[in-house]
Image (cartoon, rainbow, N blue to C red):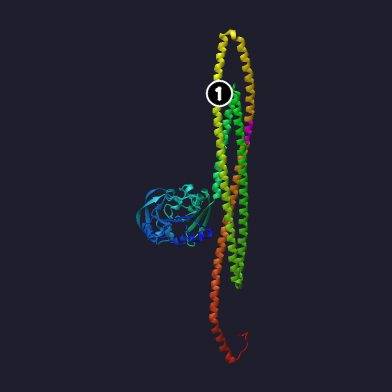
Amino acid sequence: MNRFEELLKSLSAQPSVIVHLGAGDCTEHEFYNSIHPDHIFYVEPDQLLAEAAADAFSDAPHVRIIPCAIATTDGPQTLNVTNNRRFSSLLLPAELLDFYPNITVDNTTGVEAVTLNRFCRNQAVDRNADNLLVAEIQGMEKEVFPSTEVTTLQKFKWIIVRTSEEKLYAAATEGVQQSLSDTLQEAGFMVFSFAEEAPPYVNIVGIRNDSVIESSELKAINSDLLDTVKVLEFNLSKKDTALGTLKISSAAEQANSQVVLATRAAELEAAQVQIKSIADEIEKQQQNNQEITRILNDKTAELDASEALVKSTRAENEDLNRQLDTATKTIQAKSTDLDVSEALVKSIKADNKDLKRQLDTATSTIEAKSADLDENEALVKSIEAENKDLKRQLDTATSTIEEKSVELNAAQFRIQSLSDKNSHQEQQVSALTASLQAKAQEISGIQQTLRINNKLILKSDTDLRELQTQYRTALQHQEHQHILLSELKDKLRQASLYYQKLNLQSPLIDADLIAQDEPGEKDDSGER
């Protein structure tokens, strides 16, 4: 039997939408209904089972039966129907027969198949909701999940897959469990594996790690910011070259350019302040991650103490009931700690969303600056056009001087005046060049800040991986404790039966002893 109900209870899952692939006769429906989801989708390719489910849930508006198979491509497929319909699959049985030799393929039938990507689009599964995906697709999981888009998998907060390390079906390959684990981890899930009581099945559980996913998105945004800064630096270099070629321009246009450049410098300083604020937020996130790590370490220590308590309980039969109550209270305390940890994780998610909004603001600011640069480039082109006109005017003036020698003195005076004006404008161009160099240094500082930001994000990823490892260890300790408590419960039951048996036999034993004492009139209680 699968462990879906047990695993979902341990996760305290409260999904808005439940999607069960390969639902069969929907034996989990009573439990699904108890956690009150908004919608339940049962996907079953076997027409007989799908029709039975549709009749059973016809009065439940929140339940939908989808009669189709989930595969790697859309279109018609062949379903191999077995005598035990829970093992029916698009694939033929292989090593499954070693564990269940009575399984046979009774017949085949055509079914319509869709990909998991298309199914989620058709049913409008939204990532913003807490969704649960349960998959029992009999060997197809190793093909379906690796071929599914990452964005589709990330629409589910929890994913549970029933699979096996054995080659149960003809198209399956060894190492299915590892392949699924890799797929889910690459999609940003924490992955755990739990064996079922009866081999060869295991249940792989994936819990979406929003911190890792948002951290990857932040990396992409930072990369885009670096590219944007490089483009800005290139544009500034182009502006510097264009300004170097300017010889003559009006004083009013020079003043306007200085105002624009001063405004751009102020905006760049504001962007630098925003990036520093983002770095502070990331440092705060790392501190939150360290706090979660400390809480998980405390819980691990509590689990070890609980395990020692259980071992002591097995040795002291007279105090079994009292110690069992103590262990139950300890587990409840640990559950409270897990709730606190989940609250901290939600807090980190909120912080990450704030960081993303701040990065969006910074991106918008940089885009606005790029637009200002484009306007400045248009202004430079206009200045160049005016310079050409002035050059043409100078050529005309030179021709006039050669033709009219009478006006030579006046022309020489005009040329001297233009020379003085050129000297003054060259000094202004030099001042603009120095200002642009200062802005290039400011951009270099922004790039260094972004590199530090990337290093902080990489460190955050390392802390998150350590947190995943510690969380797995905590779950393993909890599972071990559950096994010990089950053994303790069995031994208590056996002790109770043995005690009742002794109580039933004790009157007969006393009667026999009395009958033996009467002929010899023995009173030696020690001999008796």
Q: Which image quadrant is residue 320 in?
A: bottom right
Residue 87 covered by magenta stretch:
no
Tag count = 1
Residue 299 at what x, y percent from top left?
61, 59
Q: Which residues are magenta?
A: 437-444
Nearer the observer, 66 or 44: 66
Q: Which image quadrant is residue 429 in?
A: top right
Residue 288 at what x, y percent from top left?
61, 51
Q: In the rendered image, which quarter contains the C terminus?
A: bottom right
| Main secondary structure along the magenta-highlighted residues | helix
Q: Is residue 442 left or right of residue 102?
A: right
In the rendered view, tell whether residue 427 sits above or below residue 228.
above
Q: Is residue 170 visible?
A: yes
In the rendered view, tell whether residue 367 sits above or below residue 526.
above
**Rendered residue at 55%/36% (across/down):** 368
Dot 1 falls on a residue whose secondary structure is helix
Q: Which image quadrant is residue 510 in?
A: bottom right
Nearer the observer, 526 or 235: 235
Which residue carries the number 1 mark?
384
**Rendered residue at 58%/45% (across/down):** 355
Nearer the observer, 458 or 498: 458
Q: Residues within 10 Å of mark 1 (few under 14, many from 20)?
A: some
